[in-house]
């Protein structure tokens, strides 16, 4: 045990001695490295001091050179400024000398002007004196005082000015009328060109095809009960004649005629034709027609871009689908007038939407004119008032046939659009008998005037050409004759659109070579 302790103590002592020896060795090495580093730092500092001194000398040298250069430039600039100042002084001295000379000349001119003004004043006094003497002499010779002479002169000048003003006003009116006519033709031409419509003529008679002639007997029924029931329920006459495989429906009410047509077609397809079935089909047809009326009215407002109409007005528009005027469908006519009015309003810078609205509603009275007493114009105006339409629209409806005076430009536009739509070729037609009578009456009116040799109605009655006897009607009389014929036609005839009157006068010289 004592040996182990002694060994441990010996080991500890040896470790302490080794540690102290290593520490002393490392200390000596560190001191040696510190000494070497201090020597290097001192060397670096000495080198830096030497480089700094060299740089300092270089900077001082450059500064001295820059200073010398700036001083030389400043001296040069001072010399240039001094030279400029000397030149300016010379110019100023020269200008002062010129100003002195000019002042002297101005003073001389002022003296001369003053002498002239004195002379003018003296001459003016002499002229005034002579003028007074002349006025006195004129008053003595003419027997008029100065005031009376002025009044006479003013009256003469006023009369001359009035005459010249009248001539000028007449020229301006003529030029304005020519320009207005030209502009109106352009607007109407553009509107017609832009409005493309179908030339379709409707009829007031409906024809229902039959699968065979045996169906006619079934439609008539036992002792005619089926046909009587159908006529009673619809108010339409059924014409069953020798026309093969067809039944004609005739009636003045287009909606009833359409109901009868739909009901009869359904009965033919169904095959069961008896009073109870007829009544059922008529009710279904009425509902279908009511739906068609609504759809057609809405389609018309959509096509023209006219919105915000009362629902009942829309329904009345749809009813015009089944209404015709001289064979022209009234709803298509109203849509056409609406589009034409909108185009013309756009050219004139007016309210396009209001013009199209007035054009669409101008014939709204025709939708119920066979149900209500009065003209379609008055009925349409009352309907527009009832459903709260604009006053401009109401006036356009009332004025489109001249029943009242148009109060706005839109009313005049609707008149023009209505005339264009009705007068275009293919829009309307008359019965052959009425058409022939109108042409005959047109020629009779033309030939009834003195000096007329022959007359011809051409262009489907839209123009009448009149040949006159040259010995009885001279060139000046042609104008008066054309006017008289036009007035007679307007008073005695009823016609759509307008009629052109052309009068021809020719002189012929005939000789025979023998």
Image (cartoon, rainbow, N blue to C red):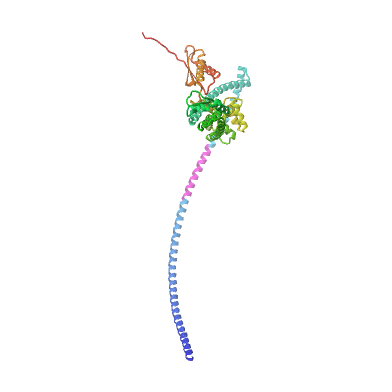
| Magenta run includes residue 91 | yes
Above-or-below relation of 10 to 422: below
Of the 4 image quadrants, the one containing the C terminus is top left
List the single residue furthest toward the left: 514
Observer able to see residue 494: yes
State left or right for residue 102 relative to residue 51. right
Identify the residue at image location x=62%, y=31%: 385
Give the answer, above or below, for where 465 lies relative to 210.
above
Q: x%, y% of residue 513?
A: 37, 9
Q: Position of residue 246 (x, y in %)?
A: 49, 26
Question: Looking at this view, is 220 or 60 the one in front?
Answer: 220
Is 346 placed left or right of 508 in the picture?
A: right
Q: Residue at 44%, 60% (x, y): give it.
A: 66
Count of numbered badges drawn on the protein: 0
Is most of the magenta stretch helix, strand or loop?
Answer: helix
Along the line of sight, which residue is nearer the eye, 307 or 502? 307
Could you tell me residue 287's position as x and y percent?
56, 34
Q: Is residue 32 left or right of residue 152?
A: left
Residue numbers of the magenta segment: 83-105
Residue at far bottom of view: 2
The picture quadrant where one finds residue 388 is top right
């Amino acid at each position: 045990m004592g040996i182990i302790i002694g060994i441990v103590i010996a080991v500890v002592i040896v470790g302490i001695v080794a540690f102290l020896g290593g520490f002393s060795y490392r200390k000596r090495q560190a001191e040696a490295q510190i000494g070497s580093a201090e020597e290097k730092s001192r060397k670096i500092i000495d080198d830096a001091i030497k480089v700094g001194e060299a740089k300092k000398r270089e900077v001082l040298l450059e500064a001295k050179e820059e200073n010398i250069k700036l001083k030389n430039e400043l001296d040069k600039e001072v010399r240039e400024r001094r030279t400029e100042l000397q030149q300016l002084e010379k110019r100023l001295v020269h200008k002062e000398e010129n100003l002195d000379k000019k002042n002297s000349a101005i003073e001389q001119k002022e003296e001369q002007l003053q002498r002239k003004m004195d002379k003018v004043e003296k001459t003016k006094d002499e002229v005034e004196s002579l003028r007074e003497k002349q006025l006195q002499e004129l008053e003595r010779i003419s027997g008029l005082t100065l005031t009376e002479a002025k009044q006479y002169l003013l009256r003469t000048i006023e009369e001359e000015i009035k005459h010249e003003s009248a001539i000028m006003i007449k020229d301006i009116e003529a030029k304005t009328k020519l320009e207005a006519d030209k502009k109106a033709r352009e607007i109407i031409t553009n509107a017609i060109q832009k409005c493309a419509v179908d030339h379709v003529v409707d009829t007031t008679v409906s024809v229902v095809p039959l699968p065979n002639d045996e169906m006619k007997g079934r439609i008539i029924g036992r002792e005619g009960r089926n046909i009587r029931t159908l006529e009673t329920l619809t108010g339409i006459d059924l014409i069953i004649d020798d026309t093969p495989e067809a039944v004609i429906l005739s009636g003045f009410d287009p909606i009833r005629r359409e109901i009868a047509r739909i009901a009869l077609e359904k009965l033919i397809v169904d095959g069961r034709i008896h009073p109870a079935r007829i009544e059922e089909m008529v009710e279904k047809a009425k509902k279908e027609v009511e739906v068609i009326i609504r759809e057609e009215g809405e389609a018309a407002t959509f096509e023209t871009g006219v919105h915000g109409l009362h629902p009942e007005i829309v329904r009345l528009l749809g009813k015009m689908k089944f209404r015709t005027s001289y064979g022209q469908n009234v709803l298509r006519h109203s849509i056409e007038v609406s589009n034409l009015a909108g185009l013309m309003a756009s050219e004139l810078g007016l309210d396009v939407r209001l013009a199209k609205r007035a054009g669409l509603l101008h014939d709204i009275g025709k939708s119920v004119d066979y149900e209500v007493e009065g003209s379609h114009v008055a009925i349409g105006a009352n309907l527009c008032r009832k459903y709260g339409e604009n006053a401009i629209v109401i006036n356009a409806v009332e004025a489109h046939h001249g029943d009242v005076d148009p109060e706005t430009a839109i009313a005049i536009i609707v008149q023009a659009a209505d005339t264009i739509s009705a007068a275009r070729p293919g829009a309307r037609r008359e019965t052959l008998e009425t058409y022939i009578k109108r042409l005959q009456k047109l020629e009779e009116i033309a030939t009834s005037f003195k000096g007329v040799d022959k007359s011809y109605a051409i262009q489907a009655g839209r123009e009448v050409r009149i040949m006159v006897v040259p010995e009885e009607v001279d060139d000046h009389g042609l104008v008066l004759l054309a006017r008289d014929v036009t007035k007679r036609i307007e008073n005695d005839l009823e016609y759509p659109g307008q009629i052109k009157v052309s009068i021809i006068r020719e002189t012929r010289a005939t000789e025979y070579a023998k």
